[in-house]
Image: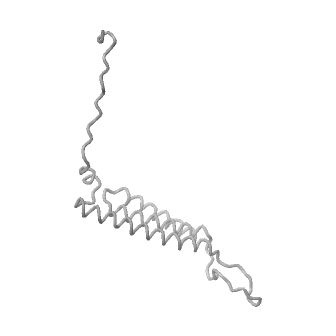
Amino acid sequence: MELVLAVLTGGLVAGGVYLMLRRNLERLLFGLVLISNAVNLLIFTSGGLTRGRPALLPVAPDVAQGATANPLPQALILTAIVIGFGLLTFALVLVHRTYREFGTLDPDAIRETEPEIAPAVAKVVPDAEEAA
């Protein structure tokens, strides 16, 4: 099962990188979401898969203290999901504002709206012979 999840994680990362390299801000966001989900899946897989075992057991003398699932990766993933959702909403607002301001989501077209900066002119220092 770990092999399947590792291949799925690699596919998500590959798809996310492919989308992030496209020249569109929407695809950049979708790539960011895919990579975020791939990292969550990686954390889940690295925690070890324990099928059919509870994450927490009640503290009682009559409960058998056997192997349980590790709750730490689950808590990390839950935190990463919340942080990823906040990042996604913030980025969506920025993309929406960019589209309203410039009318396009193409980074090259947005760059064309920047003011031109004059190239630095090299100051010519006269030679000592010319100055005399």
Residue drawn at (34%, 12%) of the image: 128
Given the current orientation, which residue lies at the most extreme left position?
103
Of 126 and 32, nearer the camera is 126
Quarter of the image where one finds residue 29: bottom left
Q: Residue at x 44, y 71 (%)?
A: 85
Q: Quadrant of the N terminus?
A: bottom right
Could you say which quadrant of the image residue 48 lies in? bottom right
- In this rendering, position of residue 68 left or right of residue 91: right
Q: Is residue 31 above or below residue 107?
A: below
* Foreground pick, 15 / 90: 90
Q: Residue at x 47, y 66 (%)?
A: 36
Q: Which residue lies most toward the right here?
A: 61
Q: Considering the image in quadrants, where does the C terminus appear?
A: top left
| Front-lying residue, 88 or 41 | 88
In the image, taking residue 59 as reference, residue 86 lies left or right, namely: left
Indicate left or right for 8 with 99 as reference: right
Residue at image location 26% in from the left, 54% down from the top: 110
Q: Position of residue 113 (x, y in %)?
A: 24, 51
- Locate residue 132 relative to residue 4 in the image: left or right: left
Residue 90 position, x and y percent, is 39, 66
Q: How is the image coloured?
A: one colour
Q: Quadrant of residue 96?
A: bottom left
How many numbered callouts? 0
